[in-house]
Image (cartoon, rainbow, N blue to C red):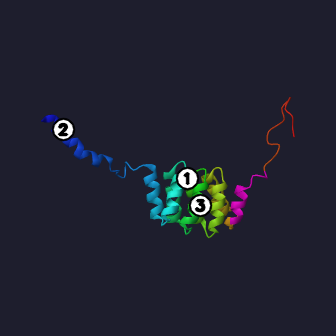
Amino acid sequence: MKLQSTIAAIALGLPLLLTPTAAQANEYDRCVRDLRDSNISPDLIASSCAYVLHPEDLGDCVERIDEKTTISAEAALRTCRQARRPIDTANCVVSISRAGAVDGSAVLEHCRRSLLPERFARCVTTLNRQVTSDLTTAMGQCIDGRDRPRDMYPEYPGRSGN
């Protein structure tokens, strides 16, 4: 009798354990919820959340950009899907967008291309604040890796120089 009541209690409580709560939701649940909240179409949600390695980061990236900038959720989704670091990319986009009026597609592209998006955003916002009033110029300066000193380190014996 005791065994039957224990089994019945477990059977009745099992569905409650299997229902995900906010703390138990898996990374796909979070991705779907965040993209749905940003009014992304169900087909695009399905393909996007299934496409990425860390779906919770994708959803968070889109949600941050959608809520904190004037950039559309669809444009944010395209960038977040391609970003190496989606959360850092979202933070970059939000930081630069807060600094002033700038083309949203340019901000998305520059933040996505940057290897270190948050550092890139600090560069852009600092140059914008202290050197140039044009965010587009600041983004171009901060992303450009061509103008670096060639002979930063001294030549050592046995090392061939170019």
Residue 8 in percent (x, y) is at 19, 42
Residue 79 in percent (x, y) is at 60, 59
* Residue behind mark 2: 6
Q: Residue type at mark 2?
A: Thr
Which quadrant of the structure image shows residue 69? bottom right
Indicate the quadrant containing the N terminus: top left, top right, bottom left or bottom right.
top left
| 133 versus 118 height, above or below | below
- Judged by depth in the image, the label closer to the viewer, 1 or 3, is 1
Q: Is residue 74 left or right of residue 4?
A: right
Indicate the quadrant containing the C terminus: top left, top right, bottom left or bottom right.
top right
**What residue sits 50% from the left and 52% below the top?**
55
Q: Is residue 102 left or right of residue 16?
A: right
Q: Secondary structure at mark 3?
A: helix
Residue 9 in percent (x, y) is at 20, 42
Residue range corresponding to the magenta coloring: 136-147
Q: How many marks?
A: 3
